Image (cartoon, rainbow, N blue to C red):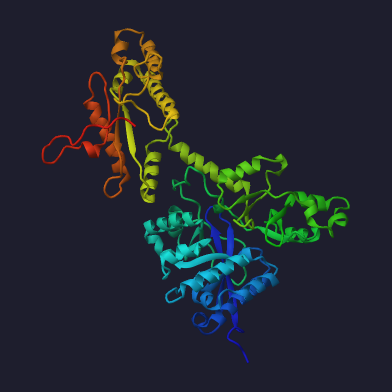
Amino acid sequence: MRSSTDTLRFAFQPVVNLTTGGIAGLEILVRPETGDILAEARRDPELDGRLAVLAVRAAARKETLLPLHVNVFAGTLADLGGLTPLHRAVREAGRLPWEVTVDIGPPYTHVPRRALLEAVSELRGQGFRICVDGVGDGDVPLRLLTDLAPDLVKLDASLLERPAAVRAMRTLCEQLGALLSVEGVETEAQCAAARAAGAQLAQGELFAPPTRIPAADVYVPPRAPGLAATPPSGPWVREFVRPAALLPDTASAGQVRALLTGSPDVSGVVLVDRDGVPVRSVHRSRFLLSMSGRYGHALYADRPAAKLGDVPRTVGDDATAWEVLDVVAVGDADRTSDDVAVVDRYGRCVGVVRLADLVRALAETRVEEAAGLNPLTRLPGSDAITGEVDRRIVDGRTFALSWLDVDHFKQVNDGAGFAAGDELIRSVGRALQSVAAGARAWGTSEGRLPGARRSGGACSAGRRRARRALGGGRQARDAVPGDRPVSAGQCDRPPAGGRVSGAAEEGREGAGRHELGAEPGGADRVRDPARNAPDARTGRPRGRGVPGR
């Protein structure tokens, strides 16, 4: 008697890394010849579990080395209490559980929450990675999403029309330590929107359609110029993870050679123990060179490949790209081209990163940062400051924005020249830096920069150089007076609506207003525009300026 699963076919759709442009995994999709077997599987947990097992076996027949994504309904996990047959099928296929991501799909309504969390915990104990699918177009509650603590969150592409929601989900993923993927991407505009919102992975017809034979190449649109760069702290290493070629640490050199010669894109093999912990790292070029030498095959073919491997270089999946470079820098110079194994919190290998990907991304980051620097001070300019304020507002973080002005600075530029003005700016910066380095607060009760009146201060040195440029006469004294007050405005919170430009302008205007009213003696205070605005009823200032901080 024929079963409903006898006529099944499976298709494979790549999950694409938007940073590297490579294939990060394959989602296995059911393609029945007749009927709606997915509707039946939604009602029949046993059938859904069998579909997951058949999906893994179908991937094994295609001999793909890429990580796999297997779909399971949330209700199936809650009813079956885990997927022991799936774990057995993965082992029989010669794959490791942490190479398989279980995509948990909706509906979540009426699914027992405790039973689902217990089933997910069991899957994690077996080594599987967890993905929450259908977010944005499904019914997964946010509370359940955070309790599941997935390794991957898949958003529906329709949510890209609401960028704020996608950015909020990216922030949540960062807190959970999860990657963010967008599925159903069909246009280049959607791809650009996914990148701009911070998604690391994506899949859809744009990159490659589902096919019965796993795709070897995908189309990834080039990154648009001017797209927001990664945060200054450096991109996370999980954004660059490539699938790792894994073999057990008992594998022979002949097995490794067969894998490398049959997969020209594989740059190395990671040998792991029974728990998936990297034991040795086999570099492609050095290994094949040893095997191709005189008597190389006879000497090594049947021996453990670990003898031709090196101690693996590993980093955690929560590391930054800069930390990977630190790992590469410490060690033999001839191993700079080796892949670095990325491990999860259990020490299991979840992929590798290549040095070329990291260097390219960090170089792009530095170029973007350099474009936003002031050419004189090499400090972040207005665009970079506005971007940082924007991130803090989006994150809901408490902050204060201050804006400092050198009062009557135009006199210096007009009278002493731009070179003297530049030197004065540098001197003020050095004074700020020296004071800020010694304490968290700077400024006096009058708000003046310490050392501004002292002949040996940094500002005094700048004034002397400016005066020498003018010959030291009366013109110099008028252009660069002995006292150079510095005024500052402050915005303790973003204005209503969270407009970044408004926050910056409020602080700047506070400094400008005080400059116009600066006393001849130069006594200055940092003013909070909100506190010192005129009272609507009396027209008088609401409060005195607060000392500089």
Q: Is residue 186 visible to the viewer in this orientation of the structure?
A: no
At a point 73% along the width and 49% down the height, the residue shown is 311
Location of the N terminus by quadrant is bottom right
* Image position of 326 (left or right of 485): right
Residue 77: x and y in percent read: 53, 74
Location of the C terminus by quadrant is top left
At a point 58% along the width and 46% down the height, the residue shown is 358
Residue 379: x and y in percent read: 43, 33
* Image position of 549 (left or right of 18): left
Question: Outermost residue, left direction?
Answer: 538
| Image label count | 0
Residue 406 lies in quadrant = top left
Residue 52: x and y in percent read: 59, 75
Residue 529: x and y in percent read: 24, 37
Q: Is residue 293 visible to the viewer in this orientation of the structure?
A: yes
* Image position of 531 (left or right of 235): left
Q: Is residue 307 above or below residue 98?
A: above
Residue 81 lies in quadrant = bottom right
* Image position of 285 (left or right of 22): right
